Image: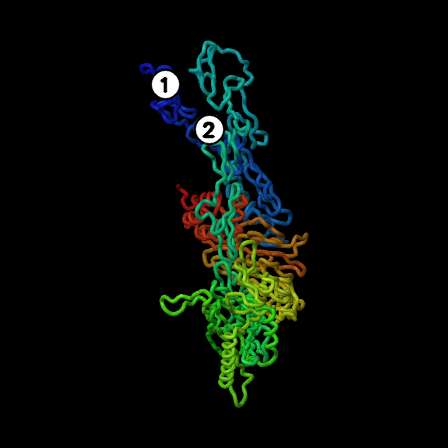
Amino acid sequence: MRTGLRYVDECVEGTDNCHIDAICQNTPRSYKCICKSGYTGDGKHCKDVDECEREDNAGCVHDCVNIPGNYRCTCYDGFHLAHDGHNCLDVDECAEGNGGCQQSCVNMMGSYECHCREGFFLSDNQHTCIQRPEEGMNCMNKNHGCAHICRETPKGGIACECRPGFELTKNQRDCKLTCNYGNGGCQHTCDDTEQGPRCGCHVKFVLHTDGKTCIGERRLEQHIPPQAVSNETCAVNNGGCDSKCHDAATGVHCSCPVGFMLQPDRKTCKDIDECRLNNGGCDHICRNTVGSFECSCKKGYKLLINERNCQDIDECSFDRTCDHICVNTPGSFQCLCHHGYLLYGVTHCGDVDECSINRGGCRFGCINTPGSYQCTCPAGQGRLHWNGKDCTEPVKCHSSPGASKAMISCSRSGKKDTCALSCPSWARFLPESENGFTVSCGIPSPRAAPGRAGHTGNSTNSNHCHEAAVLTVKQRASFKIKDAKCRLHLRNKGKTEEASRILGPGGAPCSDCQVTFIHLKCDSSRKGKGRRARTPPGKEVTRLTLELEAEVRAEETTAGCGLPCLRQRMERRLKGSLKMLRKSINQDRFLLRLAGLDYELAHKPGPVAGERAEPVEACRPGQHRSGAKCVSCPQGTYYHGQTEQCVPCPAGTFQEREGQLSCDLCPGSDAHGPLGATNVTTCAGQCSPGQHSVDGFKPCQPCPRGTYQPEAGRTLCFPCGGSLTTKHEGAASFQDCDTKDRQCGGELGEFTGYIESPNYPGNYPAGVECVWNINPPPKRKILIVVPEIFLPSEDECGDVLVMRKNSSPSSITTYETCQTYERPIAFTARSRKLWINFKTSEANSARGFQIPYVTYDEDYEQLVEDIVRDGRLYASENHQEILKDKKLIKAFFEVLAHPQNYFKYTEKHKEMLPKSFIKLLRSKVSSFLRPYK
């Protein structure tokens, strides 16, 4: 439009008043509005055209769904949409997983059927087969006459029923197909008649001679010669045009909207399949629509605003996608659980109760903790063994100190007292700061260990003895060292030889003391007295705190000296040792002997003749230099004072801590084993599975008959239980237990429960027979789900699982199998009670089964049977996984047992279950509970 000297484009400036579903087209003097394709109106008012109201159903052979400006064709269950977007083709259900049929699957138009071999008949679930007995009564008789399902009546007769989508005929035996099952076997349209379904075809298609399939396209006018018809006008039948018609001097001219192409007959419009060329420009999926096309993305991707490209969805960026660990992958994600947790469903982690299976392998008590568990020992059974599962038995203490005992040796030469603390094992060095450290040696008494600073008592030490009649004597003393600073350093060679000569055999006041634990603390951080007191350099004051523990044994008592008397003697000995220790410390003649090297506890600044000066930035003991940094000696090594390097632990020793000055002796060590052992479990000589010993190390004994042990380094063997025995000594697995006489099975009557083969998920033993009886509460019936079953594959049935009304071979059989079946199946019991028998041959063994069941109100029998007989319940792998997941199947059972809770249930579990599964249940439950909506 022209205003003054300026042209105004109302379409660009947005000043037009065209409808939102119209296209604005600028003109020299104004503009005009044209409704978009799929809409009708004057451009200022546009209304969606409902293509599905056309007589030809918009070309859709099944269902037509109107959408704004367009439409979409959909197909019935059992069909899929053809590439033209209008026709519907049959789905071959038998092509995937044999349709869930146990024996043979027969595909049909819009559906499928399971068939059984000669000698078998189809069970009520319409998927599994039951072997027909040679002689049977009522429904077990092969001549019962029912085409589909046979039921026994209370009076002993039979009543026939049909599968969903079929109707019982007048003879009350045969079943007539209706259009409600697989569209009656028709590809396009189906009408029910007295004789059965009658098939028809959509316009432009003709019925095949088979009476079901539709083929070809009617083109009645395609051979009309292209000649001008002068009397044609758009006013009559739109001039024969499929779409727009324009009158011209030569006749009518037909045109097609965007997305369509005019055909050679100049009348018909055919949709352009944009997806055929370069996939329509779509990254992933191109779907042709009538007059256009749509791009979509694979699952796990999102469509960008250009409606062409796809971008991965980072599911891990969402809150609470996974309970623990989320790993994003292209188009998907994976949830992982921390150690001690188990993934259930797709996103959730549940704690594994290790104590629920064989007490977690603990000898006595087991306490489950989130993500782990802990073994416990009852009072009087000693402490927890180094393997973390057994308990140390009270061991009688020897009369002389063992190799792992702490030892204080003191000697006097003239007026000089020299003392040394020797620690052959269980030494712990802990640098607390630059001004102090602690050293502990030996094992503290149980009461003292928890509160011991600087020492975590190794409660798994199996060599520590316990006696009821043993008294612990404790002494504590503090010492001062002037002009020295706490620093553990190696004594020079000359002084070491002198000390070794002085500390020869004898002369020690407590050489025969049963010293079990020594705790020494060196601290140079204390300031002088007074507020303004300062400690000048070189005038440091170091304080040593020493705690001793020794034992008084009842076996040393005499008639003239009991335990109190022995205690007093021990206290005098320890006090004498502390008195000599004080003198030796004052004379700078106190040593700490670790790994064959003598260390002094405090360092006096300044080089002394015969000694070398300390490096300016030397690493402290327990560390070695790595580049420009000081790092602690790793596990499996110890600090060697002479080389100032970390050295691997010798054979027969181990070290599980960092920064230590020696290694611990392996239990029962004979100096054999790997170098650099980091844990007691890596020590050589552990008892193998199937063996045990007092401390878990050699010499070992085989597990006696009737017991087994699957782990190495254990102090006991587990009994098989139930008066069972093993075929030989040294059994290393529960499978070695002979369970021929094992009691299994039992009476079951709860609302839900499990039936499982012995030792599941391990292999069941050979030659076993189990019998269960399910007696549900009044007015309730039984639903069984077999997630998967593993039996040996043989030509002749060796191991058989059968479910019948009772033990009689001629009673009504609900389920019977003797082969592996990994695809889940659900079915209702054919009788109110169930007798279940599992019998194996003398030679077979396999994983077996764990089969859940639920009882449901008989008022909902029609609904439950409609759900479990629908093949869509097992159609996809997602659905199958639901029936194999304990938590999800429990939720599924909640619906079947109480269908009225369905809507609350789907809201609770909608994030864990596929939409197709919820949709299937919704259609079943809604039609049953709300039939008139």
- Residue 15 x/y as whole percent: 33, 23
Helix, strand or loop at mark 2:
helix
**Which is more toward the observer, 843 or 313?**
313
The N terminus sits in image quarter:
top left
Which label sits in the foreground, 1 or 2? Answer: 1
The colour style of the image is: rainbow
- Is residue 237 at all visible to an observer of this figure? no
* Relative horizontal placement of residue 63, taking residue 763 as reference (left or right): left
- Residue 27 x/y as whole percent: 38, 16
Q: Residue at point 48% right, 61% down?
A: 369
**Total numbered badges shown on the rendered structure:** 2
Residue contact between numbered discs 1 and 2, judged by CB atoms under 8 Å: no
Q: Which residue is mark 2?
A: 57
Which amino acid type is marked by label 1? Tyr
Q: What distance separates the C-alpha of mark 1 from that of mark 2?
A: 36 Å
Among all residues in the image, which is located at the extreme front? 609
- Residue 641 x/y as whole percent: 58, 65
Q: Residue at point 52% right, 30% down?
A: 87
- Residue 883 x/y as whole percent: 52, 50
Among all residues in the image, which is located at the extreme left? 4
Which amino acid type is marked by label 2? Asn
Q: Which mark is residue 31?
A: 1
Badge 1 local density, few (<14 within 10 Å), some, or many (20+)? some
The C terminus sits in image quarter:
top left
- Is residue 521 at all visible to an observer of this figure? yes
Helix, strand or loop at mark 1:
strand
